[in-house]
Image: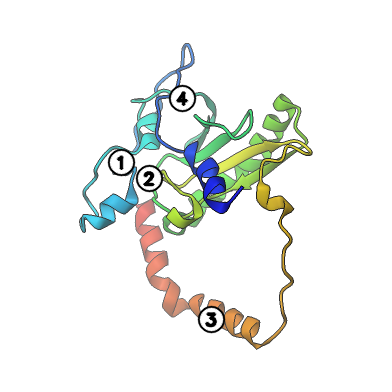
């Protein structure tokens, strides 16, 4: 299976589709998100405030679209994926709209991640799985299709052959000058002068 086929499998389940509602499912509190489902179209238009269509996750949060909700609190909720890779595949999503992980405020990321062991454990027991993948597709090249930050919890069983890449031989890291230069470049990007604007953007998202 080539990389195009693997990418299609990973990304296809994220395309916005109507979800079946659960009897008695109550609407969720309103979201303050700007409803963006295609970040690439938005950026190509050159207008960051415009939107081609509503964000599917924000519709769910506003109660405009149905979903099977497994967990919810004041910062995030967990829903079943509409096209699961395995039974029990679910998504943790923040109530507020953030198009990418780097634009999501650290407290929101922490709130989402802190629920992963609790929800993941329940999913494993309910599906009789012994493991799960915790996955974030951040950016189009990484397979992100819905541009509203979310974390995948994907239950796994031994020899399920879900990821073809698990059988690919990995090369060793060379402890050479090239690796050293890369480390220095990353460290430079983490300096306060380079991260101050990003932090300001995250703080404004919490206000």
The x and y percentages for residue 61 are 39, 32
Nearer to us: label 2 or label 1: 1
**Of the image marks 3 and 4, the number of the one nearer the N terminus:** 4
Q: Residues within 10 Å of mark 2 (few under 14, many from 20)?
A: many
Q: Mark 4 to mark 2: distance in Å?
A: 17 Å
Determine whether label 3 and label 4 are within 8 Å by CB.
Answer: no
Q: Image check: 178 left or right of 108?
A: right
Name the residue: 39% across, 51% down.
Answer: 99
Q: Mark 2 to mark 3: distance in Å?
A: 30 Å
Name the residue: 54% across, 46% down.
Answer: 5
Determine whether label 4 and label 1 are within 8 Å by CB.
Answer: no
Residue holding disc 2: 97
Name the residue: 35% across, 37% down.
Answer: 31
Disc number at residue 185?
3
Determine whether label 2 and label 1 are within 8 Å by CB.
Answer: yes
**Of the image marks 3 and 1, the number of the one nearer the N terminus:** 1
Can you name the residue that lies furthest to the top here? 23
Q: Image check: 76 left or right of 38?
A: right
- Looking at this view, is 44 or 147 the one in front? 44
Q: Mark 3 to mark 1: distance in Å?
A: 35 Å
Residue holding disc 1: 35
Whether residue 177 is visible, yes or no, is yes
Residue 27, by quadrant, is top left
The x and y percentages for residue 140 are 43, 54
Q: Name the secondary structure under disc 3.
A: helix
Disc number at residue 67?
4
The x and y percentages for residue 115 are 61, 41
Q: Name the secondary structure under disc 2.
A: loop
Q: Residues within 10 Å of mark 4 (few under 14, many from 20)?
A: many
């Amino acid at each position: 299976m080539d990389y195009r086929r693997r990418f299609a499998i990973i990304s296809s389940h994220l395309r916005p589709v109507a979800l079946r509602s659960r009897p008695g499912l109550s609407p969720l509190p309103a979201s303050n998100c700007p409803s963006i489902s295609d970040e690439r179209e938005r950026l190509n238009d050159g207008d960051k405030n415009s939107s081609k269509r509503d964000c599917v996750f924000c519709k769910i949060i506003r109660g405009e679209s149905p979903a099977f909700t497994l967990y919810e609190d004041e910062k995030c909720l967990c829903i079943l994926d509409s096209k699961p890779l395995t039974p029990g595949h679910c998504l943790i999503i923040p109530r507020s709209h953030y198009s990418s992980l780097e634009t999501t405020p650290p407290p929101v990321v922490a709130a989402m991640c802190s629920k992963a062991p609790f929800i993941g454990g329940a999913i494993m027991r309910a599906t009789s799985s012994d493991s799960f993948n915790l996955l974030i597709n951040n950016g189009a090249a990484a397979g992100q299709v819905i541009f509203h930050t979310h974390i995948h919890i994907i239950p796994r069983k031994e020899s399920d052959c879900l990821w073809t890449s698990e059988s690919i031989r990995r090369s060793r890291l060379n402890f050479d000058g090239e690796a050293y230069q890369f480390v220095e470049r990353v460290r430079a990007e983490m300096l306060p002068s380079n991260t101050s604007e990003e932090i300001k953007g995250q703080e404004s998202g919490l206000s």
